[in-house]
Image (tube, rainbow, N blue to C red):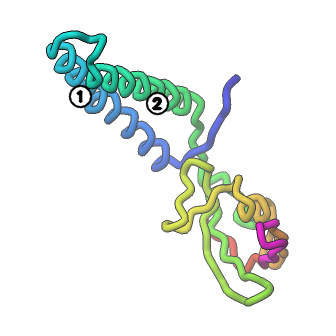
Amino acid sequence: MSNVTYYTEEGLKKLKDELHEMKTVQRPAISDQIAEARDKGDLSENAEYDAAKEAQGLLEMKISKMEELIANARIIDESEIDSSKAYILSKVKIKNVANAMQMEYTLVAENEADLKAKKISVDSPIGKGLLGKSVGEVAEVQTPNGIVKFEIVEISR
């Protein structure tokens, strides 16, 4: 079963760079650790060897998952995005109806979300609430503290 995930060109490049680093830097480093531990003698009581083998297994699992993610990745064509409604890659300025506080976020795929960079996932409660809404519409978002209403002030790309 393939899980197609959507990325910006920048997000996909970051993933590919991370995979490259795992294969060309981390994998050889772990192989060196295993060889070094093997040279220390009896493998049955060698904690360094066991730890290195476990690290190798975890890294190979990460590499495999990353390769699958990249194989199922699709790049979002920003020119196709309708800026009259909030969709993935839309920059949305919202206002909390209760306290009139304004915030601006870019809606991105789950794996590109970064709150510090003001990028929120379309799978997050706020992201889901904003999707498909137009300027002037109010999104009701379920939060742990109850429903919060956000008015969409502006949508851009």
Query: Mark 2 or 1 closer to N-term?
Result: 1
Rendered position, 4 above or below 60: below
The residues tagged by marks 2 and 1 sit, at their Cα atoms, a distance apart of 15 Å
Query: Mark 1 highlights which residue?
Result: 29
- Residue 67: percent from the left, percent from the top? 49, 27
Q: Is residue 143 magenta?
A: yes
Q: Amino acid at mark 1?
A: Ala
In the picture of the structure, the residue carrying the numbered disc 2 is: 62
Residue 71's x, y, as percent?
A: 54, 27
Foreground pick, 32 / 100: 32
Q: Residue at x 82, y 66 (%)?
A: 142
Residue occupying the point 42% across, 37% down: 16
How packed mark 2 is, by other alpha carbons closer than 10 Å (few <14, some 14-19, many 20 or more), is some
At a point 67% along the width and 32% down the height, the residue shown is 3
What span is colored magenta in the figure? Answer: 142-150
Q: Quadrant of residue 144?
A: bottom right
Which quarter of the rendering shows the C terminus? Answer: bottom right
